[in-house]
Image: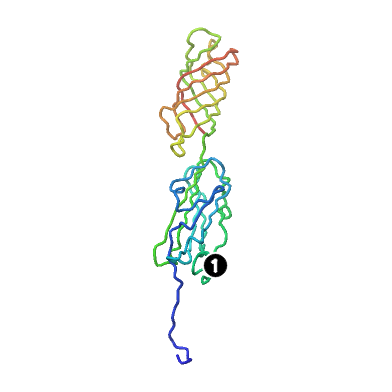
Amino acid sequence: MNGTITKYDLQLREFQIPKALGFVGLSYDKEVFPLSGNVFNKPVLTRAPIKDINIVFFENNIDTKARFYGKQYLNIEVRIYNTKSDLIEFQKIENVVVCPGEASPRYFFYDVKDCKKGEININDYLLHKTYDMEGWWKLEITIKHNDQKYSLPGYSQKITFIKEMVTALDLQVSFPTGLLVKKFSQSGFGNLTGISIAFLAQFSFYDQQKVGKLKPYKVGAGFIALDIFNLSENNKQRDLGFVVLGSLFPVRKESKFSFPLYAGCGYLLKNNTFFVVFGPGVTFNF
């Protein structure tokens, strides 16, 4: 005042309010998808390995001639869950500053020293890379405003990726009981056997309508020992053979024990003949 500095201060704050996240895009293939679209309204299921996930920004979509929003302050959280839905990794990318682009009437008046330039590659921050994700792992990316920078509530959006599988291979030891075995070298409808043992490598098939749920049947191949616990010298049913076997699980439960129905065919080594087989059993999975 009259050339003298007064004791009064005037604080100036940059005008900024959170804007809907349409200025943020995400690329996991060749194409960039804006968060304002419908692509990420549901989980993204992918069978192919996810090479990279990049977060990009459309700076020219922040300010318009009709309304200013100012700098956008974002936090990004990344979570990875394994097949059992256990959280195996959690990373934060904090204080990401996105400044309005050249289309903004105020572009030349923004301090751009802390502005983020270029895209963010999620793999740069992860220990478990996206291209190493195993079947039915889930990756969640949450992009949200840093509420400490605003007087109004910000926006938030979660994007989910799931590594999909069509089939699964497991090893199985089963105890088919009361099998009806029809040997090609014998006439009639075949004979019932006692307890047998089957060692199989089996393929399971996932239901494409239900995430991570198996269909109630398997197809596999391996060895089968017929009537193995009958040690009688006159036992003509005891034999070892190669078998291709399908199994149906009437009641499917996620447990180590199950009770399937079997049907298949194979070749018996002792009797030197092909055979077909049908019957129930008890299965142990590991």
- The secondary structure type at the circle numbered 1 is loop
Q: Quadrant of residue 241?
A: top right
x, y percentage for residue 163? 52, 42
As displayed, is residue 131 above or below residue 63?
Answer: above
Q: Pick whichever, 32 or 12, lies toward us.
A: 32
Residue 129's spot in the image, x, y percent? 57, 49
Query: Residue, x 57% and y 59% (percent of image)?
Result: 118
Which residue extends farthest top?
A: 187
Q: Nearer the viewer, residue 75 or 81?
A: 75
Q: Name the quarter where the N terminus is drawn.
A: bottom left
Identity of the residue furthest to the bottom in this view: 2
Residue furthest to the left in view is 152
Number of labels in the image equals 1
219 relative to 160, above or below: above
Q: Residue at the spot x=49%, y=32% of the render?
A: 205
At a point 45% along the width and 76% down the height, the residue shown is 12
What residue is drawn where x is 44% and y is 87%?
7
Residue 63 spot, x, y in % from top left? 47, 64
Q: Which residue is mark 1?
A: 114
- Which residue ends up furthest to the front in the rendered image? 65
Where residue 126 sits in the image (x, y, percent)?
A: 56, 53
What's under tag 1, amino acid-wise? Asp
For the residue pair 262 and 57, the one nearer the viewer reads as 57
Q: Is residue 8 above or below residue 45?
A: below
